[in-house]
Amino acid sequence: MEFLLTKIKENLNEQMLLLTISNPRKAEEIKKYNIRPVLVKDKLMFQSAAYTKTQVFHKNLKKNELVEELERLLPSYKQVQLQAVSSELTALINKKGKAAIKVKKQNNVVKAQMQMDKSHLLHNRTKKYILPEGTVVPFLKDLGVMTAEGKIVRTKYDKYRQINRFLEFIEDILPHLSQNREITILDFGCGKSYLTFAMYYYLKKLKGYDIRIIGLDLKKDVIKNCSRLAVKYGYDKLNFYEGSIEEFEGVTQVDMVVTLHACDTATDYAMYKALRWGASVILSVPCCQHELNKQIAASEFEPRTDYGILKERFCALATDGIRAKILEEQGYDTQILEFIDMEHTPKNLLIRAIHRKKQSDKKKEKAAQQVDAFCKQFGFTPTLWKLLQEEGGADDE
């Protein structure tokens, strides 16, 4: 361990690119650390990014502070990778604290390029987007997000960031989508379909997946315009239909269901449909969670429910917490993630659920008990839970 620490300390300079500490020995809250050098007011610091299951925490450290942090962290993790301009170090740490270290010299071309390019030291580096500015994307131009030259329209920058953030979520779930057959994706409440077109473009054009995407919305004029654009771009497997989530019966099997800002219980009906189709992936950004606001009945929580805005926020969070737990009960690994910065929209939470290949009856039973107890405590009867119970779906998968 001392030798490993010495080798790391030797590389704590401007030539270091990235230090990753991962694979915790115990089920720790922090899954991994990414540490990189940054220049803050022309002084060398080290930015540490600590990743939990759902969040990232950043802090800047001086070299001596980082060394103290490493002395504390290294015994608790099994793997270390250090990338520098001239070399790359990997280490596997056993239970006794001994490290098996391998060092590989960097390619001369890479080395020369990194020595000339100091962009890795910038504290606020330019973010690399999946759909980069400067590359003309036809649907972004027609939807008013991008100019004919590939520049982002100033008033549409938030929408541009939102589209790219959504594609990052799609990128994360690619291992759960088959590349050996046609994939069916449903986008309920697609609206103007910025994200629907982005999803098709990314999966079909950039990644080469065989996909069929169906967009569904109640607005006839919106569906007509989206259908026109799909034909214009030659997106032959991107179809739009007018209709409600509850009544849609156009398919029998679906791989992924997407709901973005489907209002109130429309999100519940979309999730219910996804469960009945056995969708591998569910991505949902809920909106207007009014249902529980009208149902809540718990006098002991009146300080939280006597004031309209607090009651509304509590019920919105409760709604999405219940939905996530129900999806766990139905055999999904579920996360609630930040979709886009709160400053751009208050509806910024995304529920991501991925169907578990290995089912755990114990985990499903625990989730069911948690939902049932929480709902009884506050007098809640959420639509998704009710739909499943009516058909016996809350008791078996």
Image: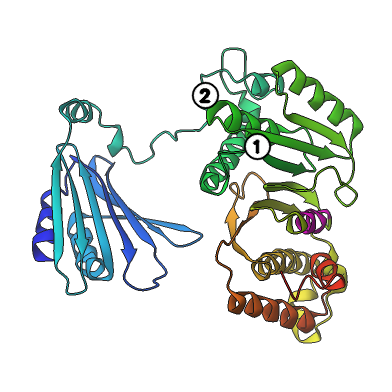
Q: Where residue 174 sits: x, y (%)?
A: 54, 44
> Residue at the location (66% across, 69% down)?
325
Left or right relative to 28: residue 13: left
Q: Is residue 200 above or below residue 24?
A: above
Magenta stretch: give its range. Answer: 266-273
Is residue 350 visible in the rendered image? The answer is yes
Is residue 270 highlighted in magenta?
Answer: yes
Residue at screen point 56% across, 19% down:
151
In the image, residue 368 sits, relative to residue 120, either above or below, namely: below
Identify the image's colour scheme: rainbow, by chain, secondary structure or one colour. Answer: rainbow
Instruction: State the image quarter where residue 240 is shown.
Output: top right
| Residue density around tag 1, few if under 14, some if 14–19, many if 20 or more, within 10 Å | few
Q: Which image quarter holds the C terminus? A: bottom right
Give the mark, 1 or 2, whose residue is nearer the N terminus.
2
Report whether 387 appears left or right of 17. right
| Residue 123 as seen in the image, left or right of residue 377 | left
Q: Quadrant of residue 3?
A: bottom left
Residue drawn at 74 percent across, 33 percent down: 193
Q: Residues within 10 Å of mark 2 (few under 14, many from 20)?
A: some
For this orientation, the residue located farthest to the top is: 149
What amino acid is at disc 2?
Glu
Vertical placement of 299 versus 253: above or below? below
Q: Quadrant of the N terminus?
A: bottom left
Q: Which numbered tag is attached to residue 133?
A: 2
264 or 69: which is nearer to us? 264
Looking at numbered disc 1 in the image, what kind of residue is underneath it? Glu
Q: Position of residue 95 (x, y in %)?
A: 21, 73
In space, the residues marked 1 and 2 are separated at their CA atoms by 30 Å
Determine the secondary structure under disc 2: loop
- Of residue 229 and residue 10, the one placed in the foreground of this image is 229
